[in-house]
Image: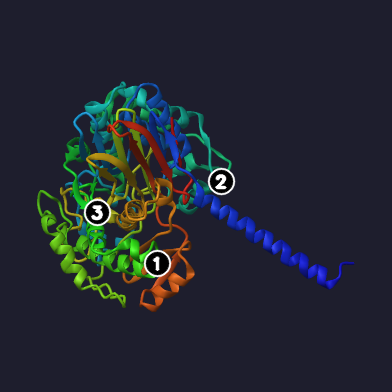
Amino acid sequence: MLSKQLFLFLIVFFVFISFINTNEVQSSKKRQSPAVGTSGIVSSAHPVATQVGLDILKSGGNAFDAAVAIAASLNVIEPMNSGIGGYGTILIYDAIKRKARFLDSSGKIPANVNSDVFRPPTPNYKDNRRGPKAVSTPGNVNAWWAMSSEYGKLKWDKLFEGAIKTAEQGFEINERFARVINQTFSEFNEYGQAVYGREGLPLGKGDVLFQRDLAQSFRLIAKEGPGAVYGGKIGKVIDRVMREKGGFLTIYDLIADRAEWWKPISINYRGYTVATASPPSTAFPSLIRLGLMSCFNNVNLGHNTAGYLHRFAEVTKHAFWCRLAYAGDPGINPPPLDNLLSEKYWKEVVKNINMKKAMPFSQPKTVVKRGDNTTHFVVADKWGNIVCATQTLGNSFGSRIMVEGTGIWLNNSLAYCTFEPKGNPMDAHAGHRKLSGDCPTIIFKDGKPWIAIGTPGGHTIGQTVPQMVMNMIDFKMDIQQAIAAPRISFREPDIILVEGGINVSVQNALEDLGHKIRLVEALGNAHGLMIKYDSMGKLVRFFGGADPRGTGLAKGY
């Protein structure tokens, strides 16, 4: 028998080895290097979609062709997050004209919407925010067409070959996807349950998902263009389903939909130009956060120290207040961006930040959704074109309505409006532009695009992106390190969400300052790319980063 001393020694030894191995794993994650390419780069939320995008680039397509193919493939491979029935925000860089543009695919709120159904005293008003009444005009396919028709090199129908193949041949469901199906299956309509279940039970990890109807929908779109959705066969089926289920969306909303090009907004942050989507997107608070943080010496404060994170927490609360106070349809009530994005304004706000105490958030009560169920991808080609896109269905599987015979999930976009008080700028105003909170961002260095980055995460999006930007500019991290670094985020009414990677002593210090801390597993699922130029300004290399919080992949060639 082992002596007591030897037994205790072995216990301590194996605990020590376990500790070393754990730290090696953690260090390995920290040391994860960016993907590298010389002719192109893709980073998306799933390896299949990433490879589809690379295949398009290798076949002679450009970033705009690849973006359409990636988006369609993500519809197939993670259908709970985005697709034909969804909407989004796309920031592009046109290398020929050396110009960034914002393509809005969030569409307009249906013309017949009655926002009273989403708030009390309407019975079941909360249910209305998820079901058929919450479906807004899906704009993704029109946006894909806008990119392809104006910038693409390949034929439209070729862009859907990867998505069609995956949908028809099926793919094995991973643990994360299985968990989402299991959580939402009971809310699916009968048709959705037939596709995502077997013998009345949800598909699980290792089962194969076949989406033959979705493949047929993509075939129709490949053949007929966006008209198949916006007034054609698919659109007519959507219209019928909405009428049967009492939704507001009609064939007339679909026919009237247009993908709209806008000029991005930007600020100068420490000599770099940081550009993002302009209104009707509500990405502008991310620039307010950066502007306010530019008033501090972040390097001296130190990365993710209590002093640094306290300032960011207070800054992010104010920017959140700005979003609630000023967001609006630019054609009706545009935000006062000339003031909000000015150094004068930032300096005035910073004067009122209490450096020694967390201040309560004082905005009138609103309900803000977290909205993790979104996707983001980036792609760049050898010519220097970039697409940085965030697309979504709203909640997981959107409204939980799959349009029979099409394999298409419809969004619940209107759930992300703010219904109290009635008539506020972010209420569901019939016929107004939908205000999206996505924040695709391109950073310019010496006039050339340097970084393209973004993330899903609902109201945390505009807080996560500035942290990644500061990681790269202030703390000189590479794209992978900047994405992987721990984050925080403000959540109403007065909570600071903190990832476990933030040092415990820092968490305690934040609590001592009066912050109400809540630990979370992960904030966002970011993807980004970085471009390197030679001394003559010629593009020579790409670097890609994929968030270790997800199961995506960055890959170059």
Q: Nearer the viewer, residue 38 or 127?
A: 38
Crowd rating for badge 2 (residues with CA inside 10 Å; few <14, some 14–19, many 20+): many
Q: Quarter of the image containing the N terminus?
A: bottom right
Residue occupying image coordinates x 18% and y 57%: 327
Q: Nearer the viewer, mark 3 or mark 1?
A: 3
Q: Nearer the viewer, residue 142 or 551?
A: 551
Q: Which disc number belongs to residue 545?
A: none
Left or right, residue 16 beside residue 139: right
Q: Nearer the viewer, residue 413 or 370?
A: 370
Q: What element does badge 3 sit on?
A: loop
Question: Where is 287 relative to 531, above or below?
Answer: below
Location of residue 138 in the rendering, given as x and y in whole percent from the top left corner: 27, 41
Residue occupying image coordinates x 35% and y 62%: 489
Judged from this view, the residue extending furthest toward the right is 1
Q: Which residue is mark 3?
A: 270
Quadrant in the rendering for residue 419: bottom left
Residue occupying image coordinates x 47% and y 37%: 47
Q: Quarter of the image containing the C terminus?
A: top left
Q: Which residue is mark 2?
A: 204
Kind of residue at disc 1: Thr
Q: Which disc number belongs to residue 305?
A: 1
Crowd rating for badge 1 (residues with CA inside 10 Å; few <14, some 14–19, many 20+): some
Kind of residue at disc 3: Arg
Location of residue 371 in the rendering, given as x and y in whole percent from the top left corner: 36, 55
Left or right, residue 291 beside residue 165: left
Question: Where is 452 relative to 469, above or below?
Answer: above
Quadrant in the rendering for residue 128: bottom left
Please indicate, yes or no, whether residue 82 appears anywhere in the rendered image: no
Please indicate, yes or no, whether residue 50 appears anywhere in the rendered image: yes
Kind of residue at disc 2: Gly
